[in-house]
Amino acid sequence: MLSNKQFGNGPRAVLVHGFTQTHETWVDVIDSLKQNFEVIAVDAPNHGDSCDISLNLESGAKAIGEVGFNATYIGYSLGGRFCLTLALAEPQLVSRLVLISTTAGIEDKEQRSERIRNDEELARRIEQIGVNQFIDEWLNQPLFAGLNNETNQRGVRLKNTAIGLSSSLRLCGAGRQQPTWSRLKELTMPVLVIAGANDEKYRRLAERLVSEIGDNATLKIVENSGHTPHLEQPEIFQDLLSNFISTQ
């Protein structure tokens, strides 16, 4: 079973982090929710204390469902792809769904193949240089320009392993995700889609997710935020999340 930590009591909310993170990325979110909810923060496959559990997107989603059972599922980036996969495969487990800076896959086959090649190169890079240097290179991307030394959670990310992160890229990279855009209307639970206003690519993806899902989906764009709204604008993010999962 995937490693996880549980907090609080009440309706259940399951938190699934992104690539290079662990369950600890959610510490502020957990503090904001645990008074009213039972919060389960998962270490995703190949991350944190689940670093030696290697699963692809489909089997990883199933493993997350086995930890969380019936719950609201909240996923950021890679975690969002896990949660979306679970909601499509086992919708009876997902009472509400929150997708943060995520996608339903790459539709173009050539682009998907290119992404697989790029992720393989990145996996080899991690194995070559180790976690410390890789995390510094990872955080130096324009995608994370909205983070600083106080908010980038470098120390949390360093708890991962080179073999775990490289395995995650090979098994769960965006190129390995089967595109599910045509299936999004199957989602009948309430869905909240969040993206940062400064994250142009994922803002557009968020807009499309909401359009494809339909009337049960809500779009929230977080101003003055890039790819990591839960870290860049934590108070705004926590209010959005709490309001959504508290609504009857």
Image (cartoon, rainbow, N blue to C red):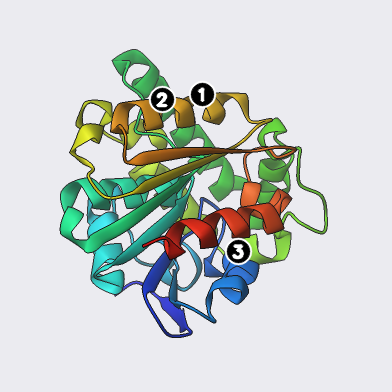
Disc 3 residue type (three-letter): Thr
Q: Which residue is mark 3?
A: 25
Eyeballing the image, is 203 above or below 26?
Answer: above
Where residue 156 sits: x, y (%)? 65, 66
Task: Look at mark 1 in the image and give the residue it sits on.
Answer: 204
| Mark 1 crowd level (few <14, some 14–19, many ≥20, 10 Å Cα) | some
User: Which of these two is toward me, 135 or 220?
Assistant: 220
> At x 34% / y 50%, what residue is drawn?
82
Q: Is residue 162 left or right of residue 54?
A: right
Counting other residues with Cα less than 10 Å from the Cα at mark 2, is it few (<14), some (14-19), or many (20 or more)? some
- The answer to the question of whether label 3 and label 1 lie on touching residues, with beta carbons closer than 8 A, is no
> Label 2, label 3: how many angstroms apart (C-alpha)?
27 Å
User: In the picture provided, is 148 more to the left or to the right than 143?
Assistant: right
Residue type at mark 2 is: Arg
* 2 vs 3, front mark: 2
**Given the image, on which type of amino acid does mark 1 rest?**
Arg
Q: Position of residue 113 (x, y in %)?
A: 35, 22
Q: Is residue 228 above or below residue 242?
A: above
Task: Name the residue at 47% across, 62% down.
Answer: 47
- Toward the right, the furthest residue is 149
Mark 2: secondary structure: helix
Which of the 4 quarters of the picture holds residue 200?
Answer: top right
Q: Residue 171 appears at what percent x and percent y?
A: 34, 45
Residue 208 badge: 2
**Along the horizontal axis of the image, is 105 left or right of 204?**
left
The reply to whether discs 2 and 1 touch (Cβ–Cβ < 8 Å) is yes
Q: Which mark is residue 48?
A: none
Vertical relation: 111 (above or below) 56: above
Can residue 247 be spotted in the picture?
yes
